[in-house]
Amino acid sequence: MSNEKIRVRIAPSPSGNLHVGTARTALFNYLFAKKMGGEYVLRIEDTDLDRSSEAFKQNIFDSLKALGLNWDEGPDVGGEYGPYKQSERFDIYPKFAQMLIDKGYAYECFCSNEDLDKEHEIAEANKVPYKYSRKCLNLTEEERAKLKAQGIKPSIRFKVDYKELVFNDLVKGELKFDTSLIGDFAIMKSNGTPTYNFAVVIDDMLMKISHVIRGEDHISNTPKQILIYEALGAKVPEFGHLGMILAPDRSKLSKRHGATAVSDFIKQGYLTEALLNFVALLGWAPSDAQEIKNVDEIAADFRIHEVSSSNSIFEYEKLNWMNGQYIKKMDISKLTDLALPFLSKYDTSKYSREKLEKIIEVTREPITLLADLENDTQYFFENPIYDEVKEILEGEVARAVLPKFLEELKTWDFDNHEEIHDKLGDIRTFFKENNGYKPKETMWAIRSALTGRTRGADMVATIQILGKDEIIKRLENLI
Ligand code: GLU
């Protein structure tokens, strides 16, 4: 590898919220830059002004930041090679288009949309792939002047000559293209704005991008882009095309399969650390079998040429599992901050911060999404819902156990975990010896009375969090 600086970029179009696929591309660029000591640039590709919006741009910023994929240069932080928003670079592209015209690599095209539609129809009728007819290639200067005088604004086309184009893709290996199949393509539209293929080359060239790592859906654009670099006499960057991300049914991942936008995953209660770890595994595999890794560990182990060239399946089930793993391990204070928005339907102010952290601590074990906490913590904030435990509460065991439990607990020290634990044990033993109740049955009765459930958080902790007054109230209501 040459000793030129490694510079990569993520270049989303703000025509939608940040897609997980784009997040994966961003991550792989970020990892590559981190590993190689390079720079990672964010460029907003908003040349299509009709489809781009400020809200989508903000969503892209927020989502990338939430994932921790912060950029070294970009529209908001600036940098040596700005502006980093294509709509602010519109004065740059025409100069380069003119340069290509002057060198004979490009020409003005006056064909109307109707003309071109006709060409497309003919190709379709003849069942041949469409290629521009080159009708405008050999217009004389006078002819062009005449058309312009009529008010017709030309587009600019790149003249594609036949050659076999070979490049070595970092992910896919050697790729060959027959450029005779491409046809002369537009680089500037008649409204004076650049096409994607042209803007991307000019920007990557001026921003000194050394490696273009992006989705395989762009692979058919790469030969066009290489031709433009060559015509400009510019250094061609290295390319790496990542396999696509497919849904479990192997179709294109879409909303009908589940969330696809990073912000929607976050809204559903996925942790950004888990989501990032999960998308890293869509194409990359750790050198040890340990899949749960933070971004620094992944960066240390990341090698772009080892990235899989085939498509990856987005297994929501696996993401859920991984999210659960992260929820179990996360620092409790941080997890509580993230959990609180999911408990907005409750009056959380009735508990101290310390108790709120305890509530999250004792309920986090079985959950996969932060959103699950709303249901799983219900009985801490409201009266329990007894529908599912009616039978237990009306049964013989509960009728015997609950009054005794109520009498006893009045003397317990609620700050003493050990004591509560032991006293609960005493109650179980008492009813086993005197009434023949299984310890499990005794506990079910108590748990059902306090929580409306037969399973859930640690009983001693639950008792401590609810507190003596609340428990007495619940038991008196029931009895
Ligand atoms: N703006 C393009 C997209 O969102 C990026 C293409 C590229 O990375 O070259 O797909």
Image: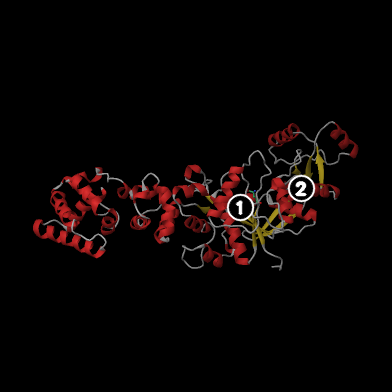
Q: Which residue is mark 1?
A: 215
> Could you tell me which residue is drawn at 66 percent across and 47 percent down?
45
Amino acid, disc 2: Tyr
Q: Position of residue 279 (x, y in %)?
A: 52, 56
> Could you tell me which residue is drawn at 69 percent across and 65 percent down?
5
- Is the distance from the Cβ of mark 1 to the nearest ligand 1 atom less than 8 Å? yes
Q: Position of residue 444 (x, y in %)?
A: 21, 53
Question: Marks 1 and 2: in contact by CB < 8 Å?
Answer: no
Q: Which image quadrant for residue 41?
A: bottom right
> Which element is circle 2 on?
helix
Q: Nearer the viewer, residue 228 or 477?
A: 477
Q: Is residue 49 left or right of residue 142?
A: left
Q: Position of residue 290 (x, y in %)?
A: 46, 65
Q: Is residue 407 left or right of residue 25?
A: left
Q: Nearer the viewer, residue 348 or 76?
A: 348
> Which element is circle 1 on?
strand
When the figure is inspected, residue 341 is found, relative to residue 210, above or below; the finding is: above
Q: Nearer the viewer, residue 345 or 141?
A: 345
Amino acid, disc 1: Gly
Q: Residue 52: tell me if it is visible.
A: yes
Judge the density around disc 1: few (<14), some (14-19), many (≥20) Cα neighbours within 10 Å: some
Seen as rendered, the residue at the extreme right is 142
Q: Which residue is mark 2?
A: 93
In the rendered image, the quadrant that contains the N terminus is bottom right
Q: Nearer the viewer, mark 2 or mark 1?
A: 2
